[in-house]
Image (cartoon, rainbow, N blue to C red):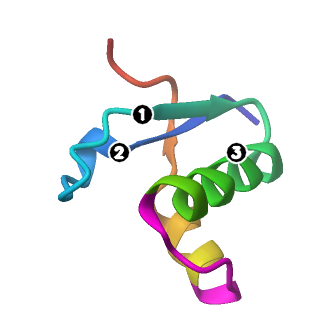
Amino acid sequence: MGRKYIDCRDYPSDAKCTVALSADSEKELLEAAVQHAVAVHQHQDSPALRETLKTMFKEGSPAA
């Protein structure tokens, strides 16, 4: 499995968040993304949130 990432810049919000997270495993990336979504974007950790976040994962590394 190659590196995956999720980038808040791809999903503009009122928070104007510019965080990008990447990891070598989908499990590790999902845990980091959930923590970020809860702490910064005030989402509730739920199975639905986790499924939505997984659909936002991309192959490779985020652009600088």
Q: Residue at x 80, y 44 (%)?
A: 28
Dot in front, 3 or 1? 1
Label 2 or label 1, whichever comes before in sequence order:
2
Indicate the amino acid at tag 2: Cys
Give the residue at mark 1.
Answer: 19
Indicate the amino acid at tag 1: Val
Residue 2 part of the magenta-drawn span: no
1 or 57: nearer the eye? Answer: 57
Q: For the residue labelled by badge 3, is the local secondary structure a helix, a strand or a loop?
A: helix
Is mark 3 in CB contact (under 8 Å) with mark 1? no
Give the residue at mark 3.
Answer: 29
Number of marks: 3
Q: Residue at x 31, y 33 (%)?
A: 18
Is mark 2 in CB contact (under 8 Å) with mark 1? yes
Label 3 or label 2, whichever comes before in sequence order:
2
Image height of 63 relative to 19, above or below = above
Q: Residue at x 19, y 52 (%)?
A: 12
Point out the stretch of residues depicted in magenta: 41-48
Image height of 10 relative to 52, above or below = above
For this orientation, the residue located farthest to the top is: 64
Left or right for 26, reference 17: right
Q: Quadrant of the N terminus?
A: top right
> What percent of the width, then of the height, locates residue 10?
25, 46
Give the residue at mark 2.
Answer: 8
Q: For the residue labelled by badge 2, is the local secondary structure a helix, a strand or a loop?
A: helix
**Magenta stretch: dominant secondary structure:** loop
> What percent of the width, then of the height, locates residue 32?
70, 46
User: From mark 3 to mark 1, how far is it between C-alphas?
Assistant: 13 Å
23 or 35: nearer the eye? Answer: 35
Is the residue marked by circle 3 packed among few (<14), some (14-19), or many (20+) residues within 10 Å?
many
Label 3 or label 1, whichever comes before in sequence order:
1
> What percent of the width, then of the height, locates residue 19?
42, 33
